[in-house]
C-alpha cells in the first residue's frame, strides 16, 4: 500500500486494541473466515456483499415483468437536497413539529420505503462524488469541497465512470439539474463526464452569495478592490451544456432575489427534461440536485414567511417539498410514475455552524463531522407497483449503493469497469422484494483521506472523533482527535446520540470483528490506491 499517514495512525490505535482482545485471524494459515462476517467476496474490485439470492430473484423477475409491460427500461430520478437534516422531513420526526410541513416528501415515504440508516459522507463534494462513482472519496480524489478559485492539478474525472456515463452509453437520456460542486474547470463539468445535459450551478450557492450579499459579507462585497480580485476567480452564474458542446452562461446572477429563484429554474428544467424524454420514448436518468437547503437561503417569490416558522430555511424546506410534489406530478401526468424509481436523499447532515439557516437532526454533531449528525440523512425509495408502500427499514444503505442499484435497475451492471474498486453494492433486492433486506454489512466514513468511523449492525465505531469546544461549531472550531486505548463504540439502539462510549466494557466480542472489517477495507487500497488531486491542505 502506498504509505498513508492516516491509516498508519488508525493502525496504531487498532494495534493497541488487538493486544488486549482475542483476535480471530491466524497469520500463518491465512485469514480464517470470521463467523460474524456475512459477506461473500465475488471479485477483487467489488465490495463484499451479503448474498440474498431469493430477493435478488424477486427483483429481477419484477424488473423483467415491468419491462415486458412497458417495452423499455425504467427511468431513474435521484433527488438530492443539499444539507437537509435527517430530522427535517415530517416523516423523520420534523415537518409540522419544527415549523416546516413536508407533505410531499412524507407521501413518498408512506407510499414507499423509508430507510432509517441511509448514509452519505459528511460534506458536499465527497458525498456527491460517492453518489456519482460508487466509490469512496479517497479513490476519486474528491475528498473535500473545492473552494473559491481552486482547481485540482489532476482532473479527477479523467479515469472515473459516472452512472450517467454508463447509462448514456446504454441508450438512456441523462441529465443533471442543479448543483454540481464536483469541478468547475474544463473537463470536469457534468456534460463532460457523462451527462447528456446539464443545467445548474457548478459550485455552491454560498460561493455566489458571498459576492452578492453585502449584509452577510460586507468585508468582501463593500470593498471594491477585493471584489475586483474575487471577480477574477468566481462569477455567480447559471450555466448549461450538452455533451460535446461548449458550456454556456444562462444567467449572470447579481441579486439575492435571483439567488432565491435558482431552484424554481432547476425545477423548470427537470420538468421539461422528463416531458421531452417521454416524448422521445427514451428512458431517463435524472439527478435533480437542489441548491437548497445549503446556506444562504433567500426566498423564491411567494415563499417569504410561507412556513409556520417563517425563517428563510424553513420557507426553503417548504419550497423543496413543493418542488418534490411538482416533479411527482410531472411523472404522473406523463404516465411515468410506475416506470420510475424515485430516490430522495440529502448529501450530508444539517450544517449547525450556520444556524438559524439550517435544519435539524436528532443525532450528535452535524455536517463536517462523522458523528451521526454529519452522515445519517433521509433516504426514501418510491416506486408504485415495484416497492411496497409503507415499508420502513433500518438496514444499512450507503450513498455509493445508488451507483450499483441504478445500474441494476436499468439492467446495465455489465457496464461496470473491472479496473476500479467499486465500494457500492447492488441493493435492488433490498428495495424491490417486499421483505427485502440490506446486502451491506458495513459503512465507512472519511474526513478527507482519513478513515474516521464505521457502522456495523447497530454499532458505530470511531477511530478518530470530532471534538468541539463550542456548540454549533462543527466545522469552524473542531479538532479531529485519534481515540486512545480503544476505539469509541456506541450502540445506536440504546445510545443514538453517541453520548457514552462502551467499547471495551460491552463490545469486547465485537472489537476484533470490526478490526477485521477495517483491515479488509484498508487493504483494498493496496491494489486500488487513493488518488491525489494535488489540492493544497492548510497544514
Ligand atoms: Ca451539502
Image (tube, grey):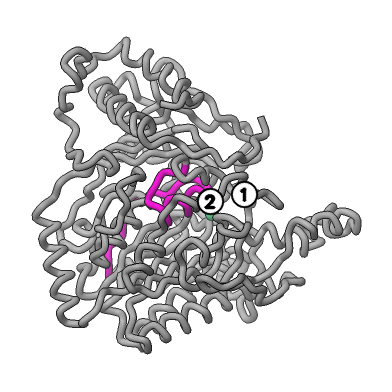
Which residue: 57% across, 68% down? Answer: 316
Residue designated by label 2: 125
Q: Which mark is residue 200?
A: none
Q: Which quarter of the rendered image does ligand 1 occupy?
A: bottom right
Instruction: State yes or no: residue 312 in magenta.
Output: no
Query: Left of 199 or right of it: where is 489?
Result: left
Instruction: State yes or no: residue 131 in magenta.
Output: yes
- Relative to 402, does residue 109 appear above or below in the rendering? below
Residue 318 appears in the picture as rendered: no
Residue designated by label 1: 146
Q: Which quadrant: the C terminus?
A: top right
Query: Left of 88 or right of it: where is 458?
Result: left
Q: Are marks 1 and 2 in contact (CB under 8 Å)?
A: yes
- Front residue of 328/128: it is 128
Is the CB of the residue bearing disc 1 within 8 angstroms of ligand 1? Answer: no
Q: Gap between marks 1 and 2, in whole Å? A: 8 Å
Instruction: Give the farthest residue toward the top.
Output: 19
Query: Left of 169 or right of it: where is 385?
Result: left
Q: Earlier in the sequence, mark 1 or mark 2?
A: 2
Magenta segment: 111-137
Is the CB of the residue bearing disc 2 within 8 angstroms of ligand 1? Answer: no
* Image coords of residue 503 (percent x, y): 34, 23
Tell me the SS state at disc 1. Answer: loop
Amino acid at each position: 500500500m502506498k504509505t498513508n499517514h492516516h491509516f498508519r495512525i488508525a493502525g496504531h490505535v487498532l494495534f493497541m486494541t488487538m493486544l488486549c482482545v482475542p483476535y480471530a485471524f491466524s497469520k500463518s494459515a491465512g485469514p480464517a473466515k470470521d463467523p460474524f462476517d456475512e459477506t461473500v467476496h465475488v471479485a477483487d474490485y467489488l465490495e463484499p456483499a451479503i448474498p440474498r439470492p431469493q430477493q435478488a430473484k424477486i427483483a429481477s423477475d419484477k424488473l423483467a415483468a415491468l419491462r415486458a409491460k412497458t417495452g423499455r427500461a425504467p427511468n431513474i430520478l435521484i433527488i438530492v437536497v443539499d444539507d437537509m437534516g435527517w430530522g427535517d422531513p415530517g416523516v423523520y420526526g420534523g415537518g409540522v413539529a419544527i415549523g416546516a410541513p413536508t407533505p410531499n416528501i412524507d407521501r413518498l415515504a408512506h407510499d414507499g420505503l423509508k430507510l432509517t440508516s441511509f448514509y452519505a459522507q459528511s460534506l458536499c463534494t465527497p458525498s456527491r462524488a460517492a453518489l456519482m462513482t460508487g466509490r469512496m472519496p479517497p479513490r476519486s480524489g474528491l475528498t473535500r469541497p473545492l473552494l473559491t478559485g481552486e482547481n485540482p492539478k489532476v482532473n479527477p474525472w479523467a479515469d472515473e465512470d459516472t452512472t450517467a456515463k454508463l447509462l448514456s452509453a446504454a441508450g438512456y437520456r441523462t441529465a443533471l439539474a442543479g448543483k454540481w460542486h464536483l469541478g468547475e474547470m474544463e473537463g470536469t463539468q457534468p456534460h463532460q463526464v457523462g451527462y447528456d445535459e446539464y443545467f445548474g450551478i457548478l459550485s455552491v450557492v454560498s460561493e455566489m452569495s458571498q459576492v452578492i450579499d453585502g449584509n452577510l459579507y460586507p468585508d468582501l462585497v463593500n470593498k471594491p478592490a477585493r471584489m475586483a480580485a474575487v471577480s477574477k476567480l468566481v462569477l455567480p452564474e447559471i450555466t448549461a451544456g450538452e455533451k460535446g458542446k461548449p458550456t454556456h452562461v444562462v444567467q449572470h446572477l447579481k441579486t439575492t432575489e435571483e439567488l432565491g429563484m435558482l431552484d424554481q429554474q432547476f425545477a423548470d428544467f427537470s420538468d421539461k427534461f422528463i416531458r421531452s424524454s417521454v416524448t422521445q420514448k427514451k428512458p431517463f436518468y435524472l439527478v435533480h440536485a437542489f441548491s437548497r437547503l445549503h446556506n444562504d437561503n433567500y426566498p423564491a417569490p411567494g415563499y417569504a414567511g410561507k412556513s409556520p416558522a417563517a425563517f428563510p430555511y424553513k420557507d426553503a424546506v417548504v419550497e423543496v417539498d413543493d418542488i418534490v410534489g411538482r416533479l411527482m406530478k410531472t411523472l404522473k401526468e406523463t404516465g411515468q410514475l410506475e416506470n420510475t424509481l424515485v430516490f430522495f436523499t440529502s448529501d450530508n447532515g444539517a450544517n449547525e455552524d450556520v444556524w438559524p439557516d439550517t435544519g435539524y437532526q436528532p443525532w450528535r454533531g452535524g455536517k463536517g463531522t462523522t458523528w451521526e449528525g454529519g452522515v445519517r440523512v433521509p433516504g426514501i425509495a418510491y416506486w408504485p407497483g415495484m416497492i411496497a408502500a409503507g415499508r420502513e427499514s433500518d438496514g444499512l444503505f450507503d450513498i455509493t449503493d445508488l451507483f450499483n442499484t441504478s445500474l441494476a435497475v436499468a439492467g446495465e451492471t455489465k457496464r461496470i469497469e473491472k479496473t476500479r474498486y467499486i465500494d457500492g453494492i447492488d441493493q435492488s433486492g433490498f428495495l424491490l422484494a417486499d421483505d427485502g433486506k440490506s446486502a451491506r454489512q458495513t459503512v465507512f466514513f472519511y474526513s478527507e483521506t482519513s478513515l474516521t468511523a464505521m457502522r456495523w449492525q447497530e454499532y458505530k465505531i470511531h477511530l478518530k472523533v470530532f471534538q468541539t469546544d463550542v456548540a454549533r461549531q462543527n466545522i469552524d472550531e473542531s479538532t479531529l482527535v485519534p481515540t486512545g486505548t480503544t476505539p469509541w463504540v456506541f450502540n445506536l439502539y440504546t445510545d443514538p446520540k453517541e453520548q457514552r462510549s462502551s467499547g471495551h466494557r460491552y463490545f469486547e466480542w465485537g472489537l476484533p470483528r470490526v478490526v477485521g472489517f477495517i483491515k479488509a477495507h484498508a487493504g483494498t487500497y493496496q491494489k486500488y490506491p487513493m488518488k491525489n488531486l494535488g489540492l493544497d491542505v492548510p497544514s
